[in-house]
Amino acid sequence: MGMEKISDSPFGYEVPPLLSNHCDLFKGGRAIDVGCANGTATKWLRAKGYDAIGIDNHLYEDQLPKYIFKADIRTFELNRFDLILALNVLQFLKFSEKKSVFAKFLDGLLPGGLLIIESFTTQDETYNRFRRDNEEEVEPNTFWSPRRNAYASFFALGELRDWAKQANLLEIFYNEEIIQDNHPPVGVHNHGIVSAVFKKL
């Protein structure tokens, strides 16, 4: 289990490459998958020896395995984790909430622990559309998306790296890129993505 694709989307790996490409860093311990969706990454971490749980606030509780919980990261208490995973979830928080959750990650991560983040950047096509259509910017690089009934928030280029430096995190991997996606009902479109692996000293 790892690089197998389960859809044509660049996000459609059974386990995201950001995880599978860095398995040599994983030493076991307590882990949390924030915004876990169907829990495939959570399950993969458990197979790698982690006591891993997943949380997501858009789940049907009667379908959850015992290690997946319906919860909101904005109110969930993070305490003493060796690995915190947040893939494609921070973009649904307002800027202020995103900063607060990042601080919560730092507090909940043990020394030597890993923080793994993937999120949208201002190179994203959706961000450009919000700008082009003069949509209201409710907070820095944050817009309300009526279609998703949610906020859409974007990291400025280099912003996540700056946050990590200010927090004295060790940068293990950092990449910003534009990738092409293709799924209904949107069709072909581009995403600006930042992917990062940090270690708490």
Image (spheres, grey):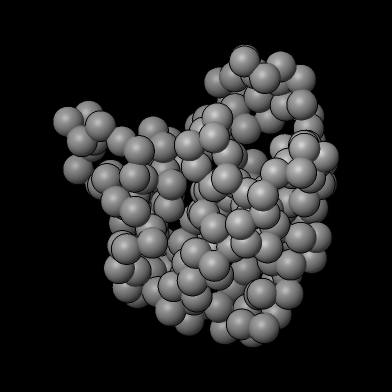
Where does residue 144 sit, x and y in percent of width and height?
Answer: 57, 45
Q: Position of residue 187 (x, y in %)?
A: 71, 16
Q: Is residue 192 above or below residue 27?
A: above
Any part of residue 184 in sight: yes
Q: Which percent across, then down, holds residue 111?
A: 48, 81
Tell me which residue sits at (48%, 37%) in the image: 149
Residue 59 coordinates in the image, percent (x, y): 31, 36
Q: How many marks?
A: 0
Task: Describe residue 55's horizontal placement relative to residue 22 as left or right.
Answer: left
In the displayed structure, 152 sits above or below 174; it is: above
Q: Is residue 186 left or right of residue 16?
A: right
Instruction: State the residue at coordinates (43%, 79%).
Output: 107
Visible residue check, residue 50: no
Viewer-closest of 149 and 33: 149
Front one among 69 and 43? 69
In the rendered image, which quarter is residue 50 located in? bottom left
Who's the residue at 41% across and 37% down the image? 37
Quadrant assignment for the C terminus:
bottom right
Residue 133 versus residue 19: which sits nearer the camera?
A: 133
Q: Which of the 4 image quarters holds residue 185?
A: top right
